[in-house]
Image: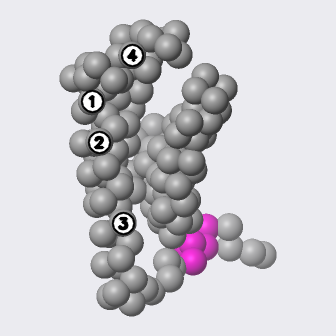
Amino acid sequence: MTNLTAAPAAAPVRSRRARIALNTTAIVLAAFFAVASALPKLFAVSAAVDSFDTIGWGAPGMYTIGALELAGAVALLVPVLSGVAPIALSALMVGACVTQIVVFDGENAATPLILMVPLVVLAWVRREKNRELLALVRRAA
């Protein structure tokens, strides 16, 4: 008979330098998404307002995207959410890239793609955090 309740494999042990690099990456990304991306939308900076008017989403779309970016920035720094946050922010970046290509003729389409590289790395490295989050959600249900 097999044991169906076996404990999941332990997370890989990372060197101190690797942990520092990953945490620094998360902090830099969180700062970028909060300060350079979310806040201009949440404070209705004229460039953001103009962009969202061009897209056709107006203020509701601008505030929604800004709030999602700010939530993602905060979630990057919360240990239990640090696995799912880069996935969610990557999804936003896919949308941003498509929007840049379709609406703005690809003017800044590379920026979201560049941001996705460290986000995907963080998502992969912190995938064990998603299992922890899922276990917490299941326990709460």
CA separation in Å, label 3 and label 2: 16 Å
CA separation in Å, label 2 and label 1: 7 Å
Which residue is painted at 34% across and 87% down in the image?
17
Chain-order first, disc 1 or disc 3: 3
Tag 2 near tag 1, CB within 8 Å: yes
Tag 3 secondary structure? helix
Which residue is painted at 49% across and 77% down in the image?
11
Which residue is painted at 68% across and 67% down in the image?
4
Q: Amino acid at mark 2?
A: Ala
Tag 4 near tag 3, CB within 8 Å: no
- Pointer 4: what residue? 50
Which residue is painted at 58% across and 32% down in the image?
100
- Pointer 2: what residue? 36
Q: Residues within 10 Å of mark 3 (few under 14, many from 20)?
A: some
Tag 2 secondary structure? helix
CA separation in Å, label 4 and label 3: 31 Å
